[in-house]
Amino acid sequence: DLDHFKRVNDEYGHQAGDKVLEAFGHLLQSSVRESDLVGRMGGEEFCIVLWNTNADNARLFTEGLRASFEALYVSACHASRDVTASFGVVARLHNESFSHLYGKADKALYEAKLTGRNRVVMVDHKPASVTQLNAA
């Protein structure tokens, strides 16, 4: 979810907001693998499905995406300096439905917003040890 996006539209106009959305979309497209899914869920909210990725790597990927967006400058759009993104990350356990996972991710996103924005929050996960990561 793009942070303070309404403020971008209010202060800089909807054309600037469109440029920010477009820039974030391009960043997403260039960051994911061909097998992953990315979609705009509405407004300034997006969903990324990383196939065959463990929870720790999903968190690392998302943290890199967050930092890349924070550093991004959208040409001809002063609003880009005012926009960051918050992320809620979950890992699928067993046979959880997309709807259930989306609800958990939304809860994590809400926590990211409440605790300061421009951050990644992951729910229901304890990081693996270095040994576990290397074995994956």
Image (cartoon, rainbow, N blue to C red):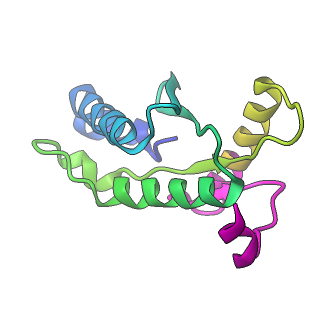
Q: Position of residue 51 (x, y in %)?
A: 62, 37
Q: Residue 107: which quarter of the image?
A: top right
Q: How many labels does the image show?
A: 0
Quarter of the image with the C terminus is bottom right
Pick the residue in front: 123 or 16: 123
Q: Is residue 86 left or right of residue 127?
A: left
Q: Relative to 57, say whether 75 is above or below.
A: above
Q: Is residue 53 left or right of residue 100?
A: left
Q: Which residue lies most toward the bottom here? A: 130
Residue numbers of the magenta segment: 110-136
Q: Which residue lies most toward the front here? A: 135
Q: Is residue 110 left or right of residue 11?
A: right
Q: In percent of the image, x 28 and y 40: which residue is there?
A: 11
Q: Relative to 11, say whether 64 is above or below.
A: below
Q: In percent of the image, x 77 and y 34: which residue is there?
A: 101
Pick the residue in front: 117 or 58: 58
Q: Residue 120: which quarter of the image?
A: bottom right
Q: Relative to 135, say whether 87 is above or below.
A: above
Q: Which residue lies most toward the right here? A: 94
Q: In percent of the image, x 45 and y 56: which residue is there?
A: 66
Q: Is residue 44 magenta?
A: no
